[in-house]
Image (cartoon, rainbow, N blue to C red):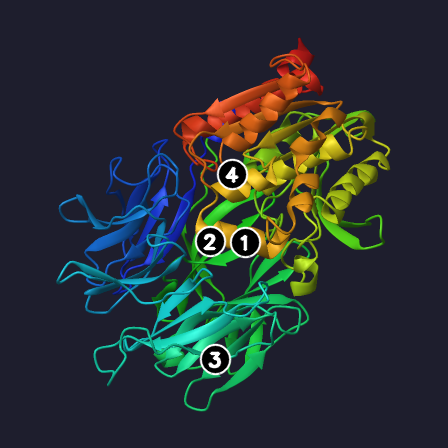
Amino acid sequence: MPAEYPLEELASLPSFYHPTVSPDGSRIAFYYDATGRNELYVQDLATGEREQVSDGEVPRQPRHGIAWDADGEGVLFHLDDDGDEQNDVYRFDLDSRERDPLVTNDGQSHFQAVSDDGRWLFYVSTAEGQMNVHRYDRETDTDERLTDYDQPVYTLELSPDGERIAYMVNESDDLDNKDVYVASVGPRATEDADGSNARNLHVGEEGAEAAPVDWLSPTELLVGDNSEDLGRSGIYDLDTDSVEWFASEFEEQPVASLGDDDAGDFLALRYREAAVVPVVYADGEARELDAPLGVAAFGGDECLVGDGTVLLTQTTPDARGNLLRYDLTDDSYETLVEADYGDIDPDAFADCEFVTYDSEDGLGIGALHYDARDGPAVDDDATDVPAVVMVHGGPHAQSLRSFNAYAQFLVSRGYTVFLPNYRGSTGRGREFKNRVHHDWGGMEQVDVREAATWLRQQEYVDDDRLAVYGGSYGGYSAYCQLTMYPDVWTTGIAWVGITDLQALYEESMPHFKTTLEQQLGDPEENAEFYRERSPVTHVEDMIASILMVHGVNDPRCPVSQARIFRDALEERGWTDGDEFRYEELGEEGHGSADIDQKIRAYRIMEEYLAERMPAAATPEADD
């Protein structure tokens, strides 16, 4: 077994994204990057024949999902300019192999549903300010806005008869609150079929988050809610205005109805100790599917294949994702897209363990621990292993027991990797998730700092070689750690991170502004908080070196965030190439799945760590 995985080989391993079943259940469409670039593929479920149908017409970054057109002859997708996420909606014709624009405007648009006859396209967009619901009539080539809310609208679902839409929005003063609304839009509605008659279903309590998930019938709606802290599933009956709840001892998220033949049955995902377990509810009873402990997900826009089978993706920390056709009746499955490992031995990847540690205030924090001694580069009895604390983005996300190529890459280079699910992470209920609100740069950063304390307590870890690394909000954490706890770290890597909260607010799109107001408060009323919790405010306190990497077209964390921090470092006398290193990635937004960009990202990280915190397995250390 080689001492390390070849950089290009690991970065080039192909991945699939957003698999979704065609309207007649005979085919699946998905993104796949086997050519080195993200492309659209279609696979026949009966024969297994797979075909690449696009040749550069779809976006390089598969951030957003795809959906079949109602006729099954085309696929809808989002197209932006070099990762800037100002999405337009396009249709790719599977016969002519041409793409045609459906919705083009100056805002960020996300398609949500297509009517069965293909005429109506529902989408949400910031074209006229805040994210609201729009409807495009493909027969007349006209567009109308159906909602006019001050806060963003998300997760729209169209009823099976095309008469109603359900969506999530908030009209209360509590910015943590999310409610489910239903409105008439169908041709058979007697009046107000333009979304103007929307009513709040009052699914959950004030301050909780409720969302529509799928329609089980024209009068029954599958919903999710966290009024009881842990996420739960429910079936709302519009005829009786009542809801039946299904809850467990774990956080759960409803996914999809199983259709007319299995009325009232649905799929869900269960979260426990950084794993995601697939669940089917039948006759009100939950059953976990027979899958390895890792991270499961049902297919994208449509996961029901037919004959009791569904699309299921499955991955574990040491095994890349497979796409399965899973039979709910007997727990058997067939593999539709098998993970490709190239020339790398699949058994060479390291597993991780789930651990917990106490933060400064006694709150238990879960984390994933990749021990470098389990990898190919470090002896089992090593006692001077460097470590990297990898901080996830969000903040409302979590590090999961899925295959993490960056963690595996670092382990192969001789670094132990530790991924904390700090307060603010998902998977542990509403109360834990909301702890970060109005405290960015506060106790969640203490949780990250205490991850370094946990590592120092491990006898095999080198106390003097600890790095912090993260992207997006994780990049904000890297900046925070190096400025707020400068004595803890040897170095840090901030990828598309945040440095100036006030500047971030001023440059954000309307729905991102709402998120910042929800989590940080009003930027004028809380100007001092915005300033104090911005890493650039504390740049003079930095001791350790830093690598900053940012895409020039990033709409979520604009490249100005990195430039502000770079300029502040230079003003205090630091020099690029000496005390810090600065990299801008052209034609890239908030991260990329493009193979060439991934290779570049791995190389930048490898070279930097080899210089600033070398491990035994790095080429520089071997020399």
Which residue, given by chain and number where applicable, does mark 4 sit on? 557
State which tag comes first along the sequence, 4 or 1.
1
Which residue, given by chain and number where applicable, does mark 3 sit on? 201
Circle 3 SS class: loop
Q: Measuring from the top left, give residue 52's x and y in whole percent.
A: 26, 41
Q: How far apart are marks 4 and 1 (CA)?
A: 13 Å
- At 57% from the left and 54% from the top, the residue drawn is 517
Q: Do the residues labelled 1 and 3 touch (CB within 8 Å)?
A: no
**Is residue 231 placed above or below 1 in the rendered structure?**
below
Identify residue type, mark 4. Cys
Q: Distance between the residues labelled 1 and 2?
A: 7 Å
Identify residue type, mark 3. Leu
Circle 2 SS class: helix
**Is residue 180 placed above or below 463 in the rendered structure?**
below
State which tag comes first along the sequence, 2 or 4.
2
Instruction: Please rate how many residues cluster around mark 2, counting C-alpha atoms within 10 Å: few if below 14, some from 14 to 19, many from 20.
Output: many
Q: Measuring from the top left, give residue 129's x and y in whole percent.
A: 38, 54
Which residue, given by chain and number where applicable, does mark 2 sit on? 511
- 370 or 374, which is in the foreground? 370
State which tag comes first along the sequence, 3 or 4.
3
State which tag comes first along the sequence, 2 or 3.
3
Q: Measuring from the top left, give residue 401's x and y in whole percent.
A: 62, 49
Circle 4 SS class: loop
Identify residue type, mark 2. His
Instruction: Please rate how many residues cluster around mark 1, counting C-alpha atoms within 10 Å: few if below 14, some from 14 to 19, many from 20.
Output: some
Circle 1 SS class: helix
Which residue, given by chain and number where applicable, does mark 1 sit on? 515
